[in-house]
Image (cartoon, rainbow, N blue to C red):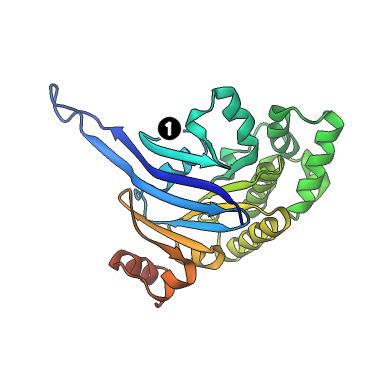
Amino acid sequence: MSVLLKAEAVSRRYRMPRQALFAVPPMLTAVNGVNLTLDRGQTLGIVGESGSGKSTLARMVMGFERPDEGRILFEGRDLNALSARELRRTRQHFQMVFQDPFGSLDPRRTAGWSIAEPLRVVGSLDRAGIARRVDEVLEQVGLRAGDAGKYPHEFSGGQRQRLAIARAISTRPALLVADEAVSALDVSVQAQILNLLMDMQEELSLGILFISHDLAVVASICDRILVMRHGDVLEAGDARAVLANPRHDYTRSLLTASGISA
């Protein structure tokens, strides 16, 4: 398999509010020297509690934020070395699915309009081609082509997440970043969305960066796992090996919280 995504010693720090008028503002290290590799067609799970740095890492992978140190390489290209125009053109090849699908679905626009938005940005299809692509991805995620004319509030939570996935895969990306993409859904709907992601991965040879606080969910879908706490990577490796023989107490606590026995 070819390497799709690579992070090399990536760090990100934020300046915090001053504690006193003339005090030096403290710095918060959200991500501290993280390394990761994701091959095409595989799933890498990033797991940790709130504040572990996993979402900050996702934003850097997407190019929404720049690392203070280190590099993010997508298909061998350093994202931070790209111009704004080059990054915008490259971003069609990596897309994101958020926890709240309303983050990517405009409630004032139809589902079809929202799904088509990335295609309009890319500009490689005419109006008829965009309409055909919208119908195609709706059916790929288990909805109907006729659903393109509905508004987000007319769908259930699980259906809205399917719409968000349809929007993300509309440009036929190589990488999908799923940031807590199923955490707001009930267990039965979670299983449906996870199965959908695995089906999409097989069909499209997607690489998936799957971010979650729930190790049980990560264990069900990921080939490899990376455990983060306070910006540091505590443990990384093959998913089965990490689950069967966790080396760090924090990983064991996550396993216990998720109802998994090592």
Give coordinates of residue 134: x percent, y percent: 78, 41
For the point 80% across and 40% down, the residue is 133
Query: In the drawing, does residue 255 fall left or right of residue 172?
Result: left
Give coordinates of residue 209: x percent, y percent: 53, 52
Mark 1 neighbour class, 10 Å CA radius: few under 14, some 14 to 19, many 20 or more:
some
For the point 30% across and 50% down, the residue is 230
Query: In the drawing, does residue 123 fall left or right of residue 216?
Result: right
Mark 1 residue element: loop
**Position of the N terminus by quadrant:** bottom right
- Which one is nearer the viewer's eye here, 237 or 46? 237
Count the numbered circles shown: 1
Residue situated furthest right in the rendering: 128
Residue 132 shows in the view = yes
Residue that label 1 marks: 66
- Which one is nearer the viewer's eye here, 117 or 108? 117
**Picture layout, residue 258 above or below residue 106:** below
For the point 32% across and 69% down, the residue is 247
| The image quarter in which residue 33 lies | top left
| Kind of residue at badge 1 | Arg
Give coordinates of residue 185: x percent, y percent: 55, 57
Residue 143 shows in the view = no
Query: In the drawing, does residue 105 fall left or right of residue 24?
Result: right
**Position of the C terminus by quadrant:** bottom left
**Picture layout, residue 148 above or below residue 228:** above
For the point 69% across and 56% down, the residue is 200
- Which one is nearer the viewer's eye here, 146 or 154? 146
**Picture layout, residue 207 above or below residue 111:** below
Give coordinates of residue 69: x percent, y percent: 35, 36
